Image: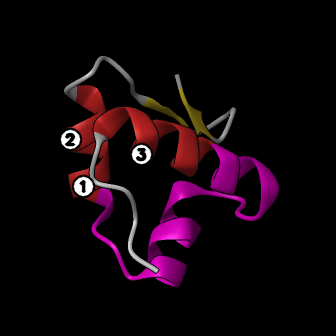
């Protein structure tokens, strides 16, 4: 499955995946074979940053 391209849908998708299945963004990216920096950049473009302590974008 590919990850959503739209930043707002991506935000919801990633945060749900992190909450329910993955202990970190790095683990999510490894499991889904996606570029972590690309996700970080795309979500930063809409004002969200990854908070490692909360394991979510906020």
* Distance in Å between CA atoms under marks 1 and 3: 14 Å
Q: Which residue position is annotated with label 2?
A: 41
* Location of residue 16 in the rendering, given as x and y in whole percent from the top left corner: 68, 47
Give whichever of 50, 10 is nearer the camera.
Answer: 10
Q: Check residue 37 in the rendering and tell me which mark sits there, or answer none.
A: 1
Question: Disc 2 vs disc 3: which is toward the camera?
Answer: 3
The answer to if 11 sits in the magenta stretch is no
Question: Disc 1 vs disc 3: which is toward the camera?
Answer: 3
Q: Secondary structure at mark 2?
A: helix
Q: Work out whether 56 lies above or below 58.
A: below
* Distance in Å between CA atoms under marks 2 and 1: 6 Å
Give neighbour class at mark 1: few <14, some 14-19, many 20+ (Cα, 10 Å): few
* Location of residue 53 in the rendering, given as x and y in whole percent from the top left corner: 67, 34
* Location of residue 40 in the rendering, given as x and y in whole percent from the top left corner: 30, 44
> Residue shown at 40%/28% (left/top)?
49
Q: Which residue position is annotated with label 3?
A: 10
Region of the chain picked out in magenta, as a range: 16-36
Q: CB of mark 2 within 8 Å of CB of mark 1?
A: yes
């Amino acid at each position: 499955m590919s990850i959503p391209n739209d930043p707002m849908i991506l935000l919801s998708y990633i945060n749900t995946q992190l909450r329910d299945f993955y202990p970190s963004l790095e683990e999510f990216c490894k499991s889904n074979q996606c570029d972590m920096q690309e996700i970080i950049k795309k979500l930063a473009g809409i004002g969200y940053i990854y908070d490692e302590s909360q394991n979510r974008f906020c």
